Every structure is written in C-alpha cells, then in structure tokens.
Image (cartoon, rainbow, N blue to C red):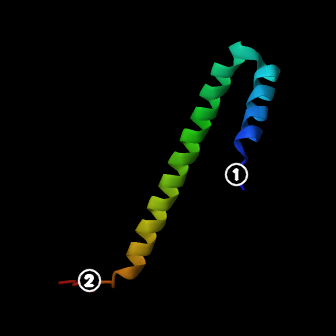
C-alpha cells in the first residue's frame, strides 16, 4: 500500500525538521547510491537467473571425441 500525498508531505516535513536544509543533499546522495547498488544487484541476479534457466532449457549436445 502506497502512502497518500498528505502522508508523504508529513514525512518530508519531519525529515526537513530532523536533518535541516544543509543535511538533505548528503542524505539524498546516500539514498541514491544505495538505490543504485540495489538496482544493480537486482539486475545481476535476474541476469544470472535467466542464464541458468536458458542453460537448463537447451538440450545437451553430445561431445565427439575423436
């Protein structure tokens, strides 16, 4: 369930009061870095999962030793 716009405003005002105007850019940068790392980890996980699933779908070709 997503918060309503009024709830978001209350949260933003509380953050502004707690950290002040000077602290917000640093907090935003930190949150952005964390989000970027989580998204990259999610993409890597999905890529590995897709590779593993594709490997299982393809039949194994017999190796010819000659």
Q: Can you give x and y, in whole percent of width and height, for residue 41 in the image?
A: 54, 50
Reading the image, the residue beneath label 1 is 2
Q: Quadrant of residue 4?
A: top right
Observer-nearest of 43 and 5: 5
Can you say whether 50 is above or below 30 in the image?
A: below
Ranked by sequence position, the earlier of labels 1 and 2 is 1
Total labels drawn: 2
The C terminus lies in quadrant: bottom left
Q: Residue at x 28, y 84 (%)?
A: 61
- Residue occupying the far front of the picture: 6
User: Closer to the observer: label 1 or label 2?
Assistant: 1
Quick one: label 2, few (<14), some, or many (20+) residues within 10 Å?
A: few
Q: Residue at x 48, y 66 (%)?
A: 49
Q: Can you give x and y, in whole percent of width and height, for residue 16 in the image?
A: 76, 22
Q: In the rendered view, does 6 fall on the left or right side of 25?
A: right
Q: Can you give x and y, in whole percent of width and height, for residue 34 in the image?
A: 61, 37
Q: In the rendered view, does 43 fall on the left or right side of 34?
A: left
Tell me, for residue 20, which label it has, or none.
Answer: none
Q: Residue at x 67, y 25 (%)?
A: 27
Quick one: label 1, few (<14), some, or many (20+) residues within 10 Å?
A: few
Observer-nearest of 2 and 46: 2
Between the residue at mark 1 and the residue at mark 2, the CA separation in whole angstroms equals: 54 Å
Q: Are marks 1 and 2 in contact (CB under 8 Å)?
A: no
Looking at the rendered structure, the secondary structure element under dot 2 is loop
Q: In the rendered view, does 34 fall on the left or right side of 10?
A: left
Can you say whether 21 is above or below 59 in the image?
A: above
Q: Residue at x 43, y 67 (%)?
A: 50
Reading the image, the residue beneath label 2 is 63
The N terminus lies in quadrant: bottom right
Q: In the rendered view, does 14 fall on the left or right side of 39?
A: right
């Amino acid at each position: 369930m997503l918060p309503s716009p009024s709830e978001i405003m209350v949260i933003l005002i509380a953050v502004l009061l707690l950290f002040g105007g000077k602290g917000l850019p640093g907090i935003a940068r930190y949150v952005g870095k964390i989000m970027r790392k989580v998204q990259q980890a999610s993409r890597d996980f999905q890529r590995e999962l897709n590779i593993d699933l594709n490997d299982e779908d393809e039949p194994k070709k017999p190796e010819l030793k000659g």
